[in-house]
């Protein structure tokens, strides 16, 4: 089958690739571009491990065809750290033990980032709602909720 | 996975491409790409149209028109679609709502199709480019439909007249045990003049509870007034059985939840 070109911005840098038509964004990112931070858990839309941000919106990369993202701006967890300095959310996940096996963490962090981008001081209910499409089999969720609330607090302290 | 996607600027060209066997329309992809990921080989060619008309929402005094590519998230954000926000918010989690389209929801098999349940209570019509069809007629023939759905439209409900409820086991987001939507018109003395009640998961696709609707006419919304409607609620239903609930359970809890919705 003929390859099709895709071109988008990934974590601030331009990417262009030839892919098989119908390739999911998840497979294009992991297998073609080499960004393995989005995880393939279920490929059914149910686990959220593949979450990415496309033009400011939370999306599931396993159900998104890469071709539909031509010209888009995509953010994944691998683009969050600033050199050796972790993003506030990554720091908070470590500090509150919100990561055990770590498989859900990139998706959780991306979903939390979208929340904090729009709602810098979310309530606990808003955090639960924002993470409701993401499954964690290890932590029991409480440390993850605490991590997001902690990150929100440290963001507002830094801004003050 | 050998899928191929074709993108067309116009609805007309997309419709022409959809005539080819094995070709399906790509909305948000939450069902159709999932099917392909699961190995459904009947889907090998996808078609989409990026016609901007498919993504527009028009709210008039007499008619609301929602393009088929409008997402659940866009409906929850729209200032004039507050009545539908609850039903749109009932679909999946935040990422699913950013992708799931109105058009796709009309084709979603039970336990999905929560938004279509609300549209059925609103007596919506569906535009497939060949004139408008009542949603009920469209749903009955949807398996044979090959043409692209371009929009749905309905008369805007009076403030607070659309009631919607979804029952799920996982909070805040979970697949439906059942969903119910109702539009009731009440006279000044509180008696019901007309009623439209739509049910989700009580058949393979959204259906109307016609017997319950009839039993409400002339009654008031009290425990006694709705008793006959609750007794008739399961008439004509054939609930699905899935990992969420058995058909028996769905039929058993339907009157309880319908009662709560009517008395709320
Ligand atoms: C994890 C998960 C949770 C979900 N939870 C819910 C839920 O709680 N409630 C619920 O109702 N649904 C739920 N869904 C199902 C689904 O997301 C929604 O029903 C959604 O609205 C489907 O729309 P789509 O645009 O993604 O459809 P697609 O997958 O793009 O399409 C579905 C079908 O409709 C056809 N189609 C789509 N648009 C058109 C059109 N304009 N014209 C003609 N044919 C068209 C496609 O060809 C395909 O056959 C869930 C799905 C997932 C993966
Ligand atoms: S891999 Fe995409 S939701 Fe699970
Ligand atoms: S840390 Fe293991 S799945 Fe969440």
Image (tube, coloured by chain):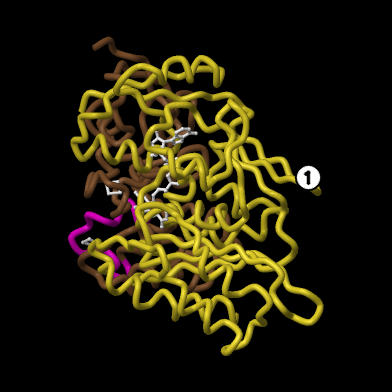
Chain colours: A brown, B yellow
A116 in relation to B19, above or below: below
Residue drawn at the location 65% of the way across and 43% of the way down: B153
The magenta stretch spans which residues? A95-109
| Secondary structure under the numbered disc 1 in the rendered image | loop
Q: Write down the residue under mark 1.
A: B60
Which quadrant is the C terminus of chain B positioned in? bottom right
Residue A108 in magenta stretch: yes
A138 in relation to A19, above or below: below
Residue drawn at the location 52% of the way across and 33% of the way down: B149
User: In this view, which residue lies farthest toward the top?
Assistant: A2
Majority SS type along the magenta span: loop
Residue A126 in magenta stretch: no
Residue nearer the viewer, B200 or A150: B200
Instruction: Specify the quarter for ligand 3.
Output: bottom left
Q: Chain of mark 1?
A: B
Residue B198 in the image: x percent, y percent?
A: 51, 61
């Amino acid at each position: 089958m003929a390859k099709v070109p895709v071109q988008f911005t990934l974590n601030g840098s331009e990417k262009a690739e030839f892919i098989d038509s119908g390739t999911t964004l998840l497979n294009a990112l992991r297998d073609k571009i080499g960004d393995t931070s989005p995880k393939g858990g279920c490929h059914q839309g149910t686990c959220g491990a593949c979450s990415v941000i496309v033009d400011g919106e939370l999306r599931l990369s396993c159900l998104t065809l890469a071709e539909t993202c031509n010209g888009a701006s995509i953010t994944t967890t691998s683009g969050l750290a600033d050199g050796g300095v972790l993003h506030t959310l990554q720091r908070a996940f470590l500090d509150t033990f919100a990561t055990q096996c770590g498989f859900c963490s990139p998706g959780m962090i991306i979903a939390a980032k979208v929340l904090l981008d729009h709602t810098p001081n979310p309530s606990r209910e808003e955090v639960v709602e924002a993470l409701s499409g993401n499954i964690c089999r290890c932590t029991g969720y409480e440390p993850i909720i605490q991590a997001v609330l902690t990150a929100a607090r440290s963001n507002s302290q830094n801004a003050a | 996975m050998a899928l191929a996607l074709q993108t067309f600027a116009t609805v007309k060209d997309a419709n022409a491409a959809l005539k080819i066997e094995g070709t399906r329309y790509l909305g948000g992809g939450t069902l159709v790409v999932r099917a392909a990921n699961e190995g459904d080989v009947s889907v090998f060619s996808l078609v989409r149209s990026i016609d901007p008309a498919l993504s527009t929402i028009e709210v008039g005094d007499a008619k609301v028109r929602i393009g088929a590519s409008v997402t659940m998230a866009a409906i929850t954000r729209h200032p004039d679609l507050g009545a539908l926000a609850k039903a749109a918010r009932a679909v999946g989690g935040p990422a699913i709502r950013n992708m799931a389209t109105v058009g796709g929801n009309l084709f979603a098999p039970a336990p999905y199709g929560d938004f279509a349940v609300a549209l059925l209570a609103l007596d919506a019509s569906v535009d497939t480019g060949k004139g408008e069809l009542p949603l009920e007629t469209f749903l009955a023939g949807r398996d044979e439909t090959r043409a692209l759905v371009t929009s749905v439209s309905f008369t805007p409900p009076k403030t607070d007249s659309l009631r919607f409820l979804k029952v799920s086991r996982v909070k805040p987001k979970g697949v439906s045990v059942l969903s119910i939507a109702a539009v009731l018109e009440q006279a000044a003395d509180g008696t019901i003049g007309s009623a439209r009640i739509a049910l989700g998961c009580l058949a393979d696709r959204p259906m109307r509870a016609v017997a319950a609707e009839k039993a409400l006419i002339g009654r008031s919304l009290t425990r006694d007034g709705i008793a006959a409607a609750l007794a008739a609620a399961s008439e004509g239903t054939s609930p699905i059985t899935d990992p969420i609930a058995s058909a028996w359970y769905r039929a058993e809890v339907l009157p309880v939840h319908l009662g709560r919705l009517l008395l709320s």
